[in-house]
Image: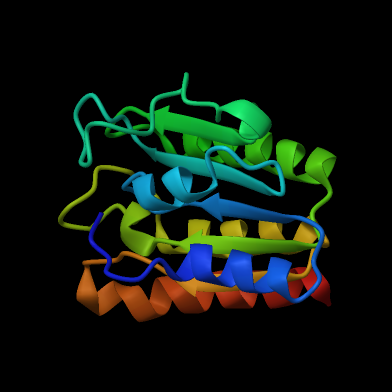
Amino acid sequence: GYCFLNNAALAAQTALDGGAGSVAILDVDYHHGNGTQDIFYSRSDVLYISIHGDPEVTFPYFSGYSDEEGEGEGAGFTVNYPLAPGSETEIWFAALHAAGGKITRFNPDILVLSLGVDIFEGDPISAFTLKPVDFWRLGSFISSLQIPTLLVMEGGYAVREIGDNVLNVLVGFEDAES
């Protein structure tokens, strides 16, 4: 990936070390979180779910396929939703709702959201079509899961819009709690 330190994995492991019984990581960055997947691939205490660009045509190319589901004790605890570049927003949200169902059934003590705002329609190195209002929808949906949640900032390369899109997630999250 693009990172030297895997903040989502560090947060999940810290939560487990601090007494959490289980953690779900939902990665919505446009690029598959190959490092996060690899770290927890054979574990059942962390559910890793990623919604990302299809690795047939999207970096990192070698991971994030839908048949990658974990191994050993971790079999079934990795879920990938690779989506075609240019996928309509409602297709993306259908994957988010499916992910939310899996997270709810897993019933984690903590949810770590790997928040990549590079899913924005104007991002120069992604090909999804989310608009600023969709980030509010994302935050609202995550809040509706009613799981203690840590948001970890990931990618976003449309520099002028990053702040607005992150703010929309936070406002959506907070509005849903009200």
Residue 71's spot in the image, x, y percent?
56, 27
- Which sits in the foreground, 63 or 42? 42
Single out the residue that lies furthest toward the left. 124
Q: Is residue 26 above or below residue 13?
A: above
Residue at image position (55%, 30%) is: 70
Residue 135's spot in the image, x, y percent?
50, 62
Residue 97's spot in the image, x, y percent?
66, 39
* Quarter of the image that includes the C terminus: bottom right
Single out the residue that lies furthest toward the front. 72
* Quarter of the image that includes the N terminus: bottom left
Residue at image position (72%, 49%) is: 45
Judged left or right of residue 73, residue 129 is left
- Which sits in the foreground, 115 or 49? 49
Q: Is residue 174 above or below residue 112?
A: below
Judged left or right of residue 129, residue 36 is right
Judged left or right of residue 163, residue 79 is right
Single out the residue that lies furthest toward the top. 67
Residue at image position (52%, 70%) is: 10
The color scheme shown is: rainbow
